[in-house]
Image (cartoon, grey):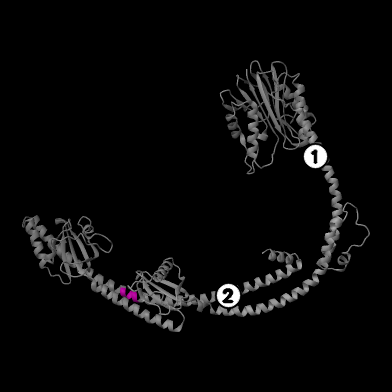
Amino acid sequence: MTSLHSISATVFSSFRARIIFFIALIMIVTAALVMYFSNQDVGKAMFIAQEQAAKDVLRFVDLNIKSGYDRLLKDRVEAMLQRRRQLKDHALIAQSVLAELADLAQRSTLTAAQARQHAVQWLQRMPQGASELFVFEPDQTIVIHTDASQIGQTVNHLVDMKGRSIGKAMKTDRLDIDGDFAVFAWQMDGKRGKHKKLGYFIPFHPWQWTIAATIDIDDIEAEAQRQQDHIVSVLYNTFRQMEQNSDAYAFLFTGQKKILIPPPEIYNPCQLTADGKLTTACEAILDKVMATAHAKRQTIRYSRSTADGDNMQMLAFTAYFKSLDWYIVIAGPVENIQKPARALVTRQSYIISAIFIVSLLIAFFLINRLFAPLNTLSAYAQELPSHDFTAATAGNLPSPIDDIARGSRDEIGRLAKSFEFMETQLRANIRQLIKTTASEERMKSELNVARTIQMGILPKTFPAFPDHSEVSLYAMLEPAKEVGGDLYDFFFLDDDHLCFCLGDVSDKGVPAALFMVITRTLVKLLAQKDRTPAQMMEHINDTLSTDNPNAMFVTLIVGILNIRTGHLQYSNGGHNPPIFVAKNGSCRYVKKISGLVVGAMEEMTYDNLTLQFEPGDGLLLYSDGVTEAMNPDRELLGDAKLLDTTKTLADQPVQDVVRAIMKTTHDHAGAAPQSDDIAIMMLRYNG
């Protein structure tokens, strides 16, 4: 196995060998496809022709069956209609006689018992002809019958062809005035065998009797069977004539798997077992034919064992005649249909093999001539790594590919010129890359220094005021780039007043960082002379708006907390609403604002807002980098999730709250890059 792999690797390491291999492969695949599709197309054409012939035969057989069945059905319907009229006349005569007797009993000319006795005597003497007459009570007991031995018997065992119980379905309370017909089988006492009868039932309401006139229809069934046997006989002769003129054959069976016309002995898959039953193989074939016919398909394949023990593949076309429950099958050996296709493929294979050998020899000769200059180019490419690409030129020495580049105008000559051009461009690009890399390294180093300076000016020592237990405070800031535009700060104005702020500059990067430093410096300076947050906000706004060519602005919250009383005075310049965290764990957004964003335009006024803290109350400030953190599906974290997260952390220390919210923000973003600076501050009044 290792030796074969080594030989394969050696052969395919040559591009020439690969080309020859792929030319051979393409020719082999092309030949295989041509032979395959030729076989498929010819085979398909033969199958189509066979299918069309089978359909024509099936259509002819179907017409024969329909013609014979229509005659059978017509004769049967006429006979049944004649007997229906006979039964109806007989039953109506009996009904009229009973009606006269019931009327005499009602007028007291006769007693009810006498009237019924007269009815029994009259009906038994009534001429019957081919029909019989009987009457039964609601309890299904026969009270009158032309055959006296049946009186006292019950009809509860009689069931018609629709599955209805005659005794229940033909009660007087269920029959309408016109009566009803039914076909059923009845074995009379003393008579052998069951006879199929047609019955007409009408109600006689005065005595709650049901009058029934019946007649045998076995002769109609016998005539229908005779005609059906004649149809089978005609089809048998048709099938045998078809077998003499083609390789196809036909057979016919019923839905009960009774073979009416068997196939020829050589193709017969349905031999009987010793006990006269169908073999398992035959049962499977018949089941497959029936399923195919009911699924509205016509074509199936099956196999049968030959006398030699081989399996012969058969192609069959099926049809189903529902009225007689007959299945017709026209079949033939698949091998006979495929012979022309196999002969064509064999002839094509000889021709294609000869073309393949000649083409391969020509290809080998041409490829050898083509690859001589390619080998020179390959050797030159292997020497390229040893060249000094930092030099401006390659020197005055001649290149080994100069002759190829100047002497060939085909693709190989252009390839050689491309090699020379590539070498020239590599020299220029490497020199430019050295310059660009040095510049980028210098810029990256300077940005890292700027980040260190920016983060260094923010207070980050916690606890911030160990000498003031009245208040707890913690803050975090993460820029989206090396430097950012979010800011926070906090410091005491005196022993009782804590000043804090948190803001977000409208841009990111170096411009935003410079604007952030200016804003924080202004907050620090103005807090010493302006004693209210609103005054500080107005002075900061005027200063930032005066010389602002890039129209940058900052959203800003500045607050002053009296740590003795818990009274907070603050001003919100267009910033996200802070979250008030009550000591009982409830949280809510404080949505009031004092004015527009800071730095947009001069002479804006801002209002002072107030909150009263109780010991244990806190306030969470954050930038929009928290609520607008976006995951890879472009879904924002949102105000609602931030509020829910804060509620779950309400009783935690301030540093745990801030860190947990920062972690929630990063978890939500997942693999998505940080899209904005993030600043979070939490303070709690301890009292």
Query: Tag 2, which secondary structure?
Result: helix
State the image quarter where residue 633 is shown.
Answer: top right
Give the x, y percent position of residue 61: 40, 77
In screen coordinates, is 234 left or right of 598?
A: left
Pick whichever, 433 or 268, lies toward us. 268
Give the x, y percent position of residue 102: 11, 58
In screen coordinates, is 536 left or right of 224?
A: right
Residue range in magenta is: 68-72
Give the x, y percent position of residue 83: 22, 70
Q: Provide the residue designation for mark 1.
A: 444
Question: Which residue sits at x=38%, y=75%?
Answer: 271
Q: Amino acid at mark 1?
A: Lys
Pick whichever, 282 or 584, lies toward us. 282
Categorize mark 2 by other alpha carbons within 10 Å: few (<14), some (14-19), many (20+).
many
The residues bearing labels 1 and 2 have C-alpha atoms spaced at a distance of 70 Å
* 26 lies above or below 247: above
* 412 lies above or below 551: below
Q: Provide the residue designation for mark 2.
A: 39
Q: How many numbered callouts?
A: 2
Question: Which residue sits at x=77%, y=28%?
Answer: 457
Q: Could you tell which of marks 1 and 2 lies nearer the N-terminus?
A: 2
